[in-house]
Image (cartoon, rainbow, N blue to C red):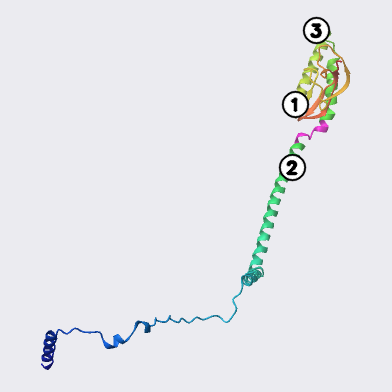
Amino acid sequence: MIQRSLLRQSRAFCAKSRYTPTASPIRSQISPSRIHPLQERIVARYYSSTDTPKDGASSDATAAAEVSHSEIKDNDPVKKELESKSKEIIDLKDKYLRSVADFRNLQERTKRDVQSARDFAISRFAQDLVESVDNLDRALGTVPSEKLGQAESNKELVHLHDGLRMTETILMQTLKKHGLERFDPSEIGEQFDPNLHEATFQTPVEGKDNGSVFMTQQKGFMLNGRVIRAAKVGVVKNG
């Protein structure tokens, strides 16, 4: 109650005297010149006691670290063992491929040798046999064609000649089955081939091409495409 009565009295007094508050005597005594700005906050900084390395020194240290790391890798026994094993695998693979290639080459050579032996097994026999074929051919050539035309007067000769001709035909067919063939280059006027023919003489012949065969002295023989005896021929040489 006392406080309320005091508050009422003070309000009434202020209203009567129209009291206006003035500046505080303490605030008026403070001048702007005496006001100093706040000092900057002091921040403590700490520095290392060791010297900072330069760029060259840092690169040298990095290089030394890389060298030491590479040395550790090089001296790694597991890595060395893996490298040795990989080299052994490469060597074994190379040896395997070489062995396969050698075996295939051996197969091809063996196949060619077997085929060659099969094709030319009778070459010596054929060389000895061609002389008999030549004699048979000469015997047939000794009979003149005029006497063969007179069948009634030379009946025995004609029959003998026909029998020899049939024998020769059957013989040549049998030899052809085994790869032995006879060839006569003068029949079709072949050009001279030193691989197939042996020229015994040369002479000019009218109506014949230069270098062509016009006469056969001895027929040639081939065994499975290989010449076992060249044909002896006369060659045309015009000019």
In-front residue for pair 228/71:
71
Amino acid identity at mark 1: Lys
Is residue 123 within the magenta segment?
yes
**Residue 40, placed above or below residue 142:** below
Quick one: quadrant of the N terminus? bottom left
Are the residues flagged by discs 2 and 1 in contact, CB closer than 8 Å? no
Please, what secondary structure does the residue beneath circle 2 have?
helix
**Residues marked 3 and 1 touching at CB (< 8 Å):** no
Up-down relation of residue 116 to residue 200 (above or below): below
Closer to the eye: label 3 or 2: 2
What type is the residue that disc 2 sits on? Arg
Numbered badge on residue 113: none
Q: Is residue 22 above or below residue 58?
A: below
Q: Which of marks 3 and 2 is nearer the N terminus?
A: 2
- Percent x, y of residue 89: 66, 59
Q: Which mark is residue 109?
A: 2
The amino acid beneath tag 3 is: Gly
Secondary structure category for the residue under label 3: helix
Give the Cα separation between the discs numbered 3 and 2: 57 Å
Residue under numbered circle 1: 176
The residue at 10%/91% (across/down) is 5
Cα separation between marks 3 and 1: 31 Å
- Above or below 188: residue 82: below
Kindly identify which numbered label has been placed on residue 149: 3
What segment is highlighted magenta in the picture?
118-125
Q: Earlier in the sequence, mark 3 or mark 1?
A: 3
Few, some or many C-alpha atoms within 10 Å of disc 2 (few <14, some 14-19, many ≥20)?
Answer: few
Kindly report which numbered mark, 2 or 1, lies closer to the viewer in this rendering.
Answer: 2
Given the current orientation, which residue lies at the most extreme right position? 201
